[in-house]
Image: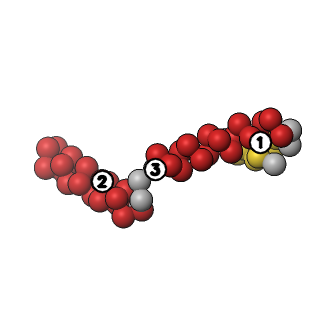
Amino acid sequence: MAVIATHTTDLVHTERREVKRYRQRYEGLAQAALAPEDSLALLTETAKRLTDKIGPPV
């Protein structure tokens, strides 16, 4: 089963072909994702560079 939640509706797929498609997409995203520590470091560095460029948030 693959459940897709959107802002307006929830979709539930039970057909093997559809579930396989969503599983493959999820696995591809998971493989491409940064490790939690690397994500935090990227966000921290990006926020610092942005603050240096335009100043702190008001």
- Left or right: residue 49 versus residue 28 is left
Which residue occupies 53% across, 50% down? Answer: 30
Q: Which residue is mark 1?
A: 19
Residue in view at x 62 percent, y 40 percent: 25
Q: Are marks 1 and 2 in contact (CB under 8 Å)?
A: no
Please state the horizontal and vertical placement of residue 53, each as a whole percent of the image. Answer: 14, 44
Q: Quadrant of residue 8?
A: top right
The reply to whether the C-beta atoms of the residues labelled 1 and 3 are less than 8 Å apart is no
**Residue type for callout 1:** Val
Q: Earlier in the sequence, mark 1 or mark 2?
A: 1
The residue carrying mark 3 is 33
* Element type where label 1 sits in the image: helix
Q: Quadrant of residue 7?
A: top right
**In the rendered structure, are the residues bearing label 3 and label 2 in contact, judged by CB atoms less than 8 Å apart?**
no
Amino acid found under the numbered disc labelled 3: Ala
Q: Residue at x 53, y 45 (%)?
A: 29
Helix, strand or loop for disc 3: loop
Residue 48 relative to residue 8: left or right: left
Q: Earlier in the sequence, mark 3 or mark 2?
A: 3
Which one is in front, 4 or 52? 4
Please name the amino acid that badge 2 sits on: Leu
Q: Is residue 57 visible?
A: no
Distance (Cα) linking label 1 and label 3: 21 Å
Where does label 2 land, which residue?
42
Q: Residue furthest right?
A: 15
Question: Percent x, y for residue 5?
Answer: 70, 45
Can residue 48 be seen here? The reply is: yes
Residue that sits furthest to the left in the current view: 52
Report how far apart the C-alphas of labels 3 and 2 lie in the structure. Answer: 12 Å
